[in-house]
Amino acid sequence: MSLTTALLVALWCTWGLIDEQTIQLQTTRPIITGPVVGLICGDLQTGLIVGATVELMFLATVFVGTATPPDTTLASGIATALACAAGGDTEIAVATALPVALIGQVVTTLQMTVVNVALLHIADRFTARGDVDSICKINKIALLFNFVFYGVPTFLAVYFGASYVQAIIDATPDWLISGLGVGGGMIGAVGLAVLLQSITNKKLWPYFVIGFVCAAFLGINMIGVGLVGVAAVFLHNYFTSARDEQPELGYEDEED
Amino acid sequence: MKNTDQKLTRQDLWKIFRGQIFIRSALNYERQQCMGFTTAMRPIINKYYETPEERAEIVDRHMQLFLTQPMVSAIPVGVAAAMEERIATEGDLDPSSVNEVKIALMGPLAALGDSLINGTARPIFAGIACSLAQAGSVMGPLMFLAVMAFITIGVRYLGVFEGYKRGVTLVTDMQKSGLIDKIGELASVAAFVVIGGFTPSIVSLALSDGLGYGTGEEFVTIQSALDGMFPCLLPLVLVLVVYALLRRTKISPVALMLLLMIAGVVGTVIGLF
């Protein structure tokens, strides 16, 4: 992996984190980071496959409140670069994604508990002086630490990891690689379970059965399931409006 | 104090919108998004407050703990802008009420933003993008980016501008009309359909082809027999088991992920998967 490629991958992952901490265009998600890193490494197809694979592993991992989720940007960025270096071998991606994501999670926690708290205490000194401009600056300086926390590790992992990745794959026994692949296929269940747990109105569980039957028994793809979901929402709204005896149109207007 | 005869202009609101983007830049575990909220309030502070003493009071007010989902945090930002404008221009509003309103909005909005955007909209569009990407098309990721950009910018724009326009009445309207509960219930419907429907694509688990009964050409794998009766049974059971574990034990989601990776390796070695 050339110096420029590794630098570009590191820059993209840093941008992914900055995006997540600012406007949230979701470039941080594997489905975007995968193809972009693939493009940087000159192998868009591998990027698309790895991006989609890692995205599905972490699709539903929504951690509410202050909980820090596993870091999917680093996971998909490094996994894609390594997969490209290994000549399009996507198994390596599944095997590396979770460990990298967990390291990223620790780094994020460190950033929020140590660095940003330290910055807060610096900002507090300006609060007493009413110096809002300095507080704004500190708020933005926090973003620069992403270069240190995410950019540098990504660069090192991609620049040095790439030359060893083939040797590591060759040295790893087949049962371990396919076993990690099986495990990677299962961890998506955790995200789905976390989502199930977060649903407020558990009495609506029959809709879960409808969705599952559509996909498993009828073979409807994800776009189709999305449409069934839209239909279910509108029908549910229609039937429950009569129950509530309140005009629902007003609500929709407020949403717009 | 200065400019106390002036209302916030559209230009001021755009400045607040730009500041709101940085709401969680310095997210910290002590007071969460407080620096971000202060950043969003900066145009108001610069417009109305002159001396360091005056500024210190309003800055301190917004440097208190604040945390909600970053996109929908635009709503309290807009509402707070309206309240701060009133405090500066009319002075007939108790400054402490700003934080009361902010805190009242935090919880419901976090739940709404997490379940509606992070828990429903994003997984749906990302899932669709994945199925297109697996077929080798860049259209999936591009569509995902466009839709999510529209959502995040749209929610932030509406939050700041509508939040400002309706001010505190927005809060009371939302609470009285039961709008938040209603949206929450509809989001639950969508989330259930999508979680059920995405289970077969997101979770893959199958028994090894070595497991079966019969001999020679009569050999039937247990997995194919299962698929004939109840397709994707194992992924479904896995999701429900993990859900039960999360509910009934204190095990963390991350620990469960690691356990599943180990289970995958062990299961492969003993010839189960």
Image (cartoon, coloured by chain):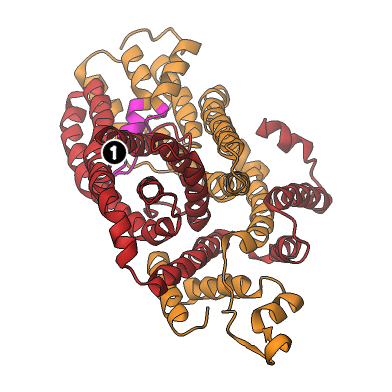
Chain colours: A red, B orange
User: What residue range appears in magenta?
Assistant: B20-39
Location of residue B58 (image quadrant): top left
Residue A149 vs B40, above or below: the answer is: below
Closer-to-camera residue (A93/A76)? A93
> Residue B29 at x, y = what percent?
28, 49
> Residue B207 at x, y = what percent?
58, 79
> Residue B8 at x, y = what percent?
46, 13
Instruction: Determine whether, in the image, residue B60 is placed left or right of residue A235.
Output: left
User: Would residue B73 be seen by someone viewing this image from the given angle?
Assistant: yes
Residue beneath the point at 56% across and 79% down: B208
Question: Does dot 1 land on a helix, a strand or a loop?
Answer: helix
Residue A153 within the segment the image draws in magenta? no
Closer-to-camera residue (B90/B264)? B264
**What residue sits right under mark 1 in the picture?**
A6
> Residue A239 at x, y = what percent?
83, 52
Residue B101 vs B130, above or below: the answer is: above
